Image (tube, grey):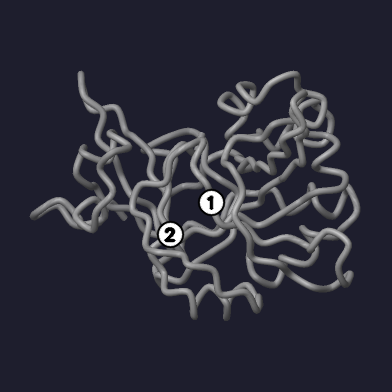
Amino acid sequence: MCGRYTITTPLEAIQRIFRVPERPNLGPRYNVAPTQSVPIVRRPPGGEPDARQLTTLRWGLIPFWAKDASIGNRLINARADGVADKPAFRDSFARRRCLVVADGFYEWQKQGSKKQPFRIVLKSREPFGFAGLWSDWKAPEGERVESCTIVTTDANALVAPIHDRMPVILDPADFDAWLDGDRETALSLLEPFDPAAMEAYPVDPRVGNVRNDDPGIIEPLPQQGSLL
């Protein structure tokens, strides 16, 4: 599962990695949580086939057939092994894939009676794209809500001691294949990321409270350093 993550990278680096022209007002986010508005990259609806659009959507996918928005609170993640076929996700998988912009994510490790949060990042500290899906939902009253979910897979060797699942992180070379590839191509990308390119370190348990969203959240705990 991926229930919290970070977006602290300057916009210029996001533009470079994702090749997007937009310059939205994206301030640093140290504790992104479900139901919040989050930046994603997608093909612009009705736009040029190869164009990319940086925009913000609600985190928690609301399928087009949903009766109300509350279902999105349970659909913040989509397991890779069912993403192409489960009713909640199959339409989005077929027609509306996206990249969820991030530069780190949190998982909690059981340590006796407590849970210790860890932040997992690329060693390069570059921003990256989670494999995501998006949906365009129309409420009975007429309001339209665009929302998204993050695809998860089995944990790699780095994350496994912390948690058994992790979000799918895509190599930039695979961005277009995820956005536009056929079913088999897209499914082939839903694999754990190379653990040698990542590191994890323990952070303050304050991250467990969504109201805590400050730079101190991402600092390593004193005298503990990296997990790997």
Quadrant showing the C terminus: bottom left
As shown in the figure, which amino acid type bears the numbered disc 2?
Ile
Relative depth, front residue between 39 and 101: 39
**Relative to 171, residue 167 above or below:** above
Q: Earlier in the sequence, mark 2 or mark 1?
A: 2
- The label on residue 152 is none
Question: Does 42 sit left or right of 158 as displayed?
Answer: right
Q: Are marks 2 and 1 in contact (CB under 8 Å)?
A: yes
**Relative to 27, residue 4 above or below:** above
As shown in the figure, which amino acid type bears the numbered disc 1?
Val
**Relative to 145, residue 198 above or below:** below
Per the image, label 2 sits on a secondary structure element best described as strand
- Front label number (2 vs 1): 1
Residue 62's spot in the image, x, y percent?
69, 31
| Distance between mark 2 and mark 1 Cα atoms | 9 Å
How many labels sit on residues? 2
Relative depth, front residue between 145 and 132: 145
**Relative to 82, residue 169 above or below:** below
Per the image, label 1 sits on a secondary structure element best described as strand
* Residue bearing mark 1: 38
Residue 208's spot in the image, x, y percent?
29, 34
Q: Residue at x 73, y 39 (%)?
A: 144
Relative depth, front residue between 90 and 148: 148
Q: Residue at x 65, y 79 (%)?
A: 21
Q: Residue at x 49, y 58 (%)?
A: 102
Residue 151's spot in the image, x, y percent?
64, 42
- The label on residue 7 is 2
